[in-house]
Amino acid sequence: MKKSNRECSWIFKIIFSFLMLMYFTSCNTTYIRAFIRRDANVKDYLYFPERIIHKSDNVYEFKKETNPLVEDKLEKLLNVDDFQTFINKTKTQSFMVIKDNNIIFEAYGYGYNQDSIVTSFSVAKSFDSAMIGKLIEQGKIKSEYQPITDFIPELVERDKRFCSIRICDLLGMCSGISYDEKFKNDDTKTYYDPDLRSLAIYKTEIGSEPGKEFLYNNYNPLFLGIIIERVAGMSVSSYLEKNIWQPMGTENDGSWSLDSNKDAFEKMESGINGRTMDFARFGCLYRDLGIINGKRVISEEWIRKSTSNIHEGKNEFYTDSFGKEISSAKNGGYYGYFWYGLKRKDFDRDDFFAAGNKGQIIYVSPKTNLVIVRFGEKYGIDFWKWISVFYDFASEC
């Protein structure tokens, strides 16, 4: 019996070593990666190749003016006795509240601090949106209504219906491209595939008419990444660095995880890594309508449009379960161009937020000049509970 156990142990070690070898060589596959790594993890930036996004030479400085009432208000809204205990219990890595130009509250979970690297997950999509807006401003894309086949003509050869998909359909999660999280494992493919360009161009299918229905779909940002690098003539990371990351006054280098060393394409749906304070700067940039450090980075027109309810009045738009969650969110929710929104009936701009897996959130309330940032290893509490608390906090601030 002991001998048999030893033999099984050696067999397991051989199989595991073989899988690891395949993972770290060009022979790897999507499912081997998924088997080894399993669920997405906040430390995945250590395992994927990366491209550095260099920091700014002109840092946008925050002032620190801690307001003790903030913690009391958060504890009341969350119905907890001690916020730090709550932070640790919910596996929150970092939590920051910025009012005007002042950090009025910050807290970090056990083992984390302001210098810890956090990963965006789908918060990256809001950066994708910013880059598209910038390319339109620069005249390199005519408008968000331009067909994606103008930039990716290979798609026409597979299915002429791709000609009907516009950039705005990708941004609004209504491209009509088939996406199945469970049976087709599209979440796994778009996260772990070592050649995301080919996955998008050659292995996607159209399932419904573009522009009609909301369907959260990680193929959409992959197509946008291909468009960005082709139009800009450089990698997505380089374009972000020169046009968004550095101009918005980042204090630290960031990075963007890549699908593989061989194909070196940015994980457009999820892969930006940086410090909490630099993600907060992105929120401030959008709160202040594209101006930071006294300079315009993104056009006001694009920021207003991309964070607005572009499908207002289309009651049939949110048909799937997640779409219904969005539309039924506190005070009326919606999805813009890779940004979520919550209506503010008494102000000319709504609250809006970027959000990712595990409860990564950049929440912006223009009405109260507020930015709230939360990153975590896990959601900790229900995602929409976080959003409801942030909305109520901003309402009372």
Image (cartoon, rainbow, N blue to C red):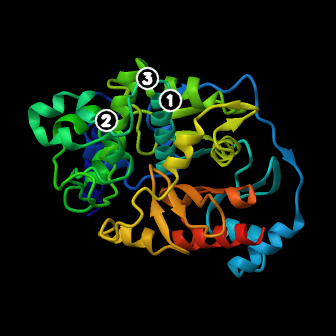
Q: Residues within 10 Å of mark 3 (few under 14, many from 20)?
A: some
As drawn, the label of residue 277 is none
SS type, badge 3: loop
Cα distance, mark 1 to mark 3?
A: 19 Å
Circle 2 or circle 3, nearest the eye = 2
Q: Which mark is residue 235?
A: 3
**Quarter of the figure with the N terminus:** bottom left
Classify 10 Å Cα crowding around label 1: few (below 14), some (14-19), many (20 and above). some
Mark 2: secondary structure: loop
Residue 270 horizontal side relative to residue 118, left or right: left
Of helix, strand and loop, which one carries label 1? helix
- Residue 137 circle label: 1
Q: Quadrant of residue 203?
A: top left
Q: Give amino acid for label 1.
A: Glu
Q: Position of residue 29 (x, y in %)?
A: 25, 39
Q: Is residue 271 left or right of residue 350?
A: left
Identify the residue at image location x=47%, y=59%.
Answer: 309
Q: Is residue 265 left or right of residue 118?
A: left
**In the figure, 242 relative to 224: above or below?**
above
Inspect this view and state whether residue 382 appears. no
Q: Residue at x 70, y 60 (%)?
A: 367
Give how far apart the Cα atoms at labels 2 and 1 are: 14 Å
Mark toward the start of the polypeptide (2 vs 1): 1
Mark closer to the chain start, 2 or 3: 2
Between disc 1 and disc 3, whose residue precedes? 1
Q: Which quarter of the picture shows residue 351?
A: bottom right
In the image, is residue 371 above or below residue 19? Answer: below
Query: Which residue was labeled with disc 2?
Result: 146
